Amino acid sequence: KAVSVSWCSKTSTLVTGLNNNVLESAKLTLSEEGLACEATLGLDLPGHRTGVRGLAVSHDDSLVMSMSAEAVKIWNSSTGRCVRTMPSGYGLCGFFVAGNEHVVLGTKEGKLQLYDLRVAELSLELEAHTGEVYGLAESPEHDSFVSCSADRHVRHFAFAFSKDASRAVTWKELPEKVLELPDECLAVSYAPNGKWIAVALLNHTVQLLFADTGKFYLSLYGHKLPVMALDLSSDSQIVASGSADKNVKLWSTQFGNCHRSLRAHDESVMQVRFLPGTHYLATAGRDREVKLWDCDSYEVITTLQGHASEILALALSQDAAFIVTGSSDRQIRFWRRSQEQLFLSEERAKELEEQFEKEAVREDVPMAGTEVTAPRPSRRTIESVRTTERLMEILDEAAEAEDTGGPHPCVTVVKYVNTLTASNIYEVLLALPFTHSLRLLRCIAQFLEGVASLPSGSGRADETKVLSAAATLETPCQAALITAYVHHRELAHSSVARGILMALRRHMRGLLRAERDRIGMSMAGFSHLQRALKRYGSLGIGPTQPTKSGKAGKSGGPATGPGPSQRPTKKRKR
């Protein structure tokens, strides 16, 4: 399948990029018979055609094996060159046999395949399981291995070595050690001390079995989704399990208790591997990241990023000098250990800085698309939809009235805008289309221009006009600001809209300043009146209460009512 095409007009050559890592070129010639296409050159990269499902490193760290749906490949770990390519089944797991001249492969079809690297041929094949072979684990003595499959069985195999060059390595199954487990097996691992075999099951648990007898030892439960990978530390004290619930759990092999549950990745954890001789753990997940953890302090040491798709395979060298990862993007990446010291505080600061950069809003970079995101949660109701439709009708009627030359309709539009409340004005204007929003801004600008041109005479009628117009400023100004905020990107690219916005800014600023001064003057007058009333009340100055005979009080003032500090008293009878 072609995924990209390039055409060279000078040479009439067509270059096609296929989805299986192949480039093909063809030369097109036009003759009397018609258009002829002739294949000229092709570039076939040594990489995989499909996603990499499994990886393994040889015992001397010189070779790396990778498995995919169409072939198994052997790579030189120092140069990165592909030295062997052997067609195979759908490889899911595998390992190098002692001597690094043979590899064992477990396939999706349930077969075990043995390849001889010296001649790059398949030397032995066995239909060991009826389901997919998800895991293979070699014993610490390198003389046997176990396989786990979706058919709920764990099978043991013993190697047989001979001097015959044609059949130097063979194996035989040990039927007395066949184990049937309660659910599908997804991963298997040998303990470095050779005492236990750990098996990950589809029922979210991990079972530890005795390697010699196959009897049950411990059941580790706590994951919420199936366990996808597991591994044991070099001292056989810790079991690490990675699950589809995005967590990595660390278990004790002595009592089966969970030391710590780590939120390792943002997606499913696909692989976990302990670095040899340490309690450092490497994890890989579907979030395209590789993380290195300290299982003693339960802290993440560093995060490695580079894959373009989910990571499905992970392998380590024997001395932990490099990590190999394989992904569904068909890439195999080598991560080599450097000599530089790593400080956790610097790593945490770097992670925080990267997170801030991702979350920061760049005003100088245009966002993809023209959709406007509401800055606060909003809920569209039937009332807000009807209000928006009514506002659109009024704006359409205003546009028709302008065309017919009738009375200016901006007053009708502003009058309806003033009926909007603080609870629904944002939802109504958010649902208003851009064309109607532009008409609304134009009507508000014309209304503000008319208010600004009102006479400022000293007559009572002129003052009433100014005050009544100023009383309707709050809601139109708020509507103009919300509309400009919602449609600011579209308004910035229109010259007509920019003129309307400049007029709104000019008139709105002047009117709001005048309104602020008027309110400030009124507040100052009321404050002065309040202070005067308090002062007169404390001095006892004011009118007195009239007596029953109708005469004034002692102060001789008019008898209109009690003063601020005087109250009528009632004489007591003896």
Image (cartoon, helix red, strand yellow):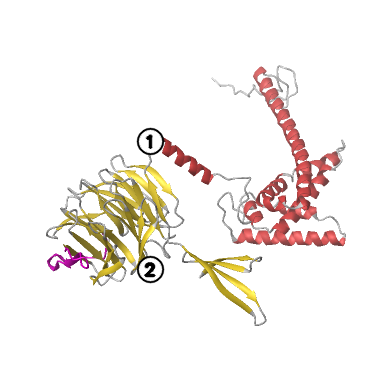
Residue that mark 1 sits on: 341
Q: Residue at x 20, y 45 (%)?
A: 235
The kind of residue tagged 1 is Gln
Q: Position of residue 448 (x, y in %)?
A: 79, 46
Return the residue at label 2.
Answer: 70
Find residue 257 and report its horizontal and vertical position in percent: 22, 48
| For residue 22, above or below residue 278 | below
Label 1 vs label 2: CA separation? Answer: 41 Å
Q: Can residue 400 be seen in this snapshot?
A: yes
Residue at 76% x, 50% y is 444
Q: Amino acid at mark 2?
A: Glu
Taking 180 as reference, is 480 above or below it? above
Front tag of 1 and 2: 2
On the image, the x and y values in percent for residue 395 come to 75, 59
Q: Quadrant of the C terminus?
A: top right
In this view, the residue in front, 399 or 161, is 161
Disc 1 crowd, CA 10 A, few/some/many (<14, 14-19, 20+): few
| Between 398 and 356, the one nearer to me in the picture | 356
Where is residue 320 shown, x and y percent of the image?
A: 31, 46
Q: What secondary structure is found at the residue carrying circle 1? A: loop
Q: Is residue 181 magenta?
A: yes
The residue segment tinted magenta is 161-187
Q: Nearer the viewer, residue 466 or 366?
A: 366
- The residue located at (39%, 48%) in the rendering is 335
